[in-house]
Image (cartoon, rainbow, N blue to C red):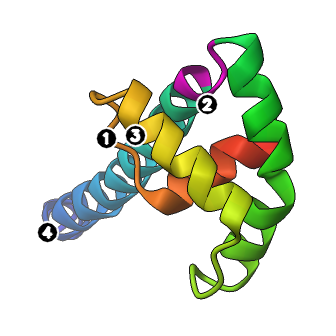
Amino acid sequence: MRLLPLLLLTPLATLFWAGHAQAFDTTTQSLVISGYATSQVTTGPFDNKLIIAAQDDAAVFIATDGQLRGAQFESALLYLRQTQPKLRASDLELAQAILVQ
């Protein structure tokens, strides 16, 4: 009789921990992507001036869920996409990376 509760509890515990592991993996993946985007955004002195100038526009972009795009933010995105063709970050991820600078 003592074995029956253990047999029922083990699969439930496994499902519980698997859900946490998946959530941790998703969080870790987001952090890695953001870190990579941040490192790609800050490569040179001209880039820094362009990125710093776009910070206010990036904040507005994030605050409005992408509804408002300022000219400086658009310019920074265009520059980053042209100079970093392997960069696979979304506009929102790039906006967050710009704000970190």
* SS for callout 3: helix
Q: Which residue is mark 4?
A: 4
Q: CA distance from mark 2 to mark 3?
A: 14 Å
- Hey, what amino acid is under mark 4? Leu
Q: Nearer the viewer, mark 4 or mark 2?
A: 2
* Above/below status of 55 relative to 31: below
Please report the bounds of the magenta region as a residue range.
39-43
1 or 2: tag closer to the N-terminus: 2
Q: Report the disc number at residue 88.
A: 1
Q: Nearer the viewer, mark 4 or mark 3?
A: 3
Assign the magenta stretch its main secondary structure: helix
Q: Report the disc number at residue 81.
A: 3
* SS for callout 4: helix
Q: CA distance from mark 1 to mark 2?
A: 12 Å
Q: How many numbered badges does the structure rendering display?
A: 4
1 or 4: tag closer to the N-terminus: 4
Q: CA distance from mark 1 to mark 3?
A: 9 Å
32, 69: nearer the viewer = 69
The answer to whether the residue labelled 1 contacts the one labelled 2, judged by CB atoms less than 8 Å apart, is: no
Residue 54, magenta (yes or no)? no
- Hey, what amino acid is under mark 3? Arg
Q: Which residue is mark 2?
A: 38
Determine whether, in the image, residue 35 is placed left or right of residue 13.
Answer: right
Rate crowding at label 3 as few (under 14), some (14 to 19) or many (20 or more) other CA atoms within 10 Å: some
